[in-house]
Amino acid sequence: MGFNVFVTRLIPPEGMEMLKAVCDTLTVNPYDRPLTKQEIIKAVKDKKRDGLLCLLCDPIDREVIEALGPTIKGIANYAVGYNNIDVARATELAIPVSNTPGVLTHATADLAWALLFTAARRIVESDKFTRSGKFDGWAPMLHRGTDVTGSTLGVVGAGRIGTAFALKSKGFGMRVLYCDPSRNEAMEKGVGAKRVDLETLLRESDFVSLHVPLVPETRHMINAERLALMKRTAFLINTSRGPVVDEGALVEALKEKRIAGAGLDVYENEPTFAPGLTELENVVMVAHIGSATTTTRAKMARMAAADLIAMMNGDRPENCVNPKVYKKKT
């Protein structure tokens, strides 16, 4: 007998085809938008779902998890982060949860570099200026940006993505500082990175790139006090999680030119922004596209589907974030 699965939003066909092959009932959010919590509950409550495939923007909290009922065998999150899921409650109910780590490492690291260069060289401003018909020829003072080559790069968080991001700096002859609870030999050997505390990194870096998970300790890690430590000529890049930065404090720092600029892929209260953020010319804003390459999103779809199928079959998924559930079952 096939499985009964709910997918909170259409994912690439590579994953959907895998699910179709094992499901009698495969229900997908029919709207091209995120579902509300109540819509998710309505879609799963009393529906005897075996599996749930959800996205980072879906609030899979205690109420949603309890609405899944006794038939649920697993929750697959189509993202590397899983702060949207009440993993503790899922674990209490012996429901395994999976994510999609690894496959989006380079895509996200590449985007962080794209944001860094775009902000440093004022690409968006110059693009708008040129398209508007204002460009009337080369000028010595027009859209002067900031040098990247030879500058100091600060990497906050030296996990998979932070490491990949740092190693990509090799071609730019940068001095690399990093802040992480653990020493990272790959970064130290690869680009001569030096491990320092966060305050030192903020004071000395020309570019600060955030690559930490969202946990209680990192929420508002970059606040008004820490933004004040940065150079007036420095840029902040965030491709990690929005709430790592106090967005209101960032708006004030950008508005008052206390830092030179920022490049953001994530926001504190997605999809809304702190008042004034969208009006600033010294910030580059993109729509949470860190993993948005055709190849990467297809790999994520296959990984999420494979893990959900494994969980529904009673097997341990490759990317389980709460392995304690399997100890509970034995």
Image (tube, rainbow, N blue to C red):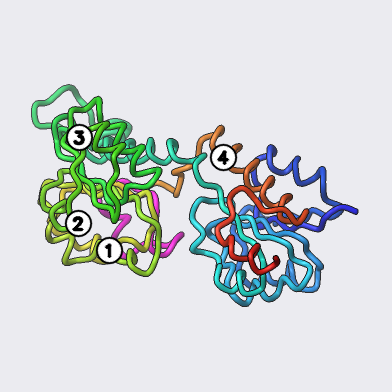
What residue is shown at x 73% (from left), y 59% (from top)?
Answer: 51
- Look at label 3 and name its amino acid: Gly
Circle 4 or circle 3, nearest the eye: 3
Q: Position of residue 83 (x, y in %)?
A: 49, 63
Distance between the alpha carbons at the discs numbered 3 and 1: 25 Å
Earlier along the polypeptide chain: callout 2 or callout 1?
A: 2
Quadrant for residue 143, please give it. Answer: top left
Find numbered disc 3 in the image and state the secondary structure of the residue it sits on: loop
Quadrant of the image for the C terminus?
bottom right
Q: Nearer the viewer, residue 121 or 12?
A: 12
Distance between the alpha carbons at the discs numbered 4 and 3: 32 Å
Q: Is residue 70 above or below residue 320?
A: below
Circle 3 or circle 1, nearest the eye: 3
The boundaries of the magenta stretch are 265-285
Q: Position of residue 114 (x, y in %)?
A: 33, 36
Earlier along the polypeptide chain: callout 1 or callout 4?
A: 1
Q: Is residue 66 above or below residue 316?
A: below
Earlier along the polypeptide chain: callout 3 or callout 1?
A: 3
Tell whether position 282 is magenta: yes
